[in-house]
Image: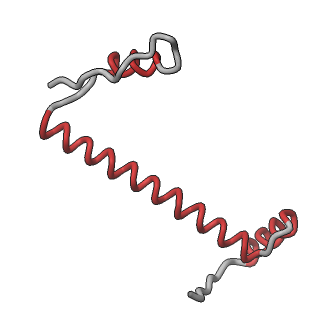
Amino acid sequence: MPTSLKIDPEMKSRIQALAQQRDRSAHWIMREAIREYVDREEAREGFRQEASDAWMAYQETGRHLTAAETIGWLESWGTESEREAPECHD
């Protein structure tokens, strides 16, 4: 889908310089920048939604782990005494 984008002359110059340095077209640089931005923002939104869902689940059930339980479990990762995830409690 054709789309036009108005950018100021300074940004245009910066994009063109970067495109030359990377041996890419200015069009490629802009598409890549937009793709990276959208990927990052989608991931951020997914994280925000996951956190919101977890908070709602906690409010409904009260199930949780303490920070000490979580840290102890994570610190065991990659060691000979790696532990299973602790059980949640109310």
Residue at 87%, 69% (x, y): give it: 20
Q: Position of residue 59 (x, y in %)?
A: 15, 39
Locate residue 71: give its quadrant.
top left
Where the C terminus falls, by quadrant? top left
- Identify the residue at the far top of this view: 81
Is residue 78 found left or right of 71 in the rendered image? Answer: right
Residue 54 screen position, x and y as percent: 26, 42
Considering the image in quadrants, where does the N terminus appear?
bottom right
**Residue, far bottom:** 2
Q: Is residue 64 left or right of residue 30?
A: left
Q: In this orientation, which residue lies closer to the viewer: 69 or 21?
A: 69
Q: Relative to the observer, which residue lies in front, 17 or 63?
A: 63
Return the x and y of residue 63 as percentages of the image width and height. Answer: 18, 30
* Quarter-of-image position of residue 45: bottom left
Image point (83%, 63%), residue name: 22
Q: Residue at x 19, y 37 (%)?
A: 58
> Would you place residue 32 above or below residue 79 in this image?
below
Give me the residue at 72% from left, 73% from top: 28
Q: How many marks?
A: 0
Figure quadrant of residue 36: bottom right
User: Left of 38 or right of it: where is 47?
Assistant: left
Question: What sort of colour scheme is used for the picture?
Answer: secondary structure
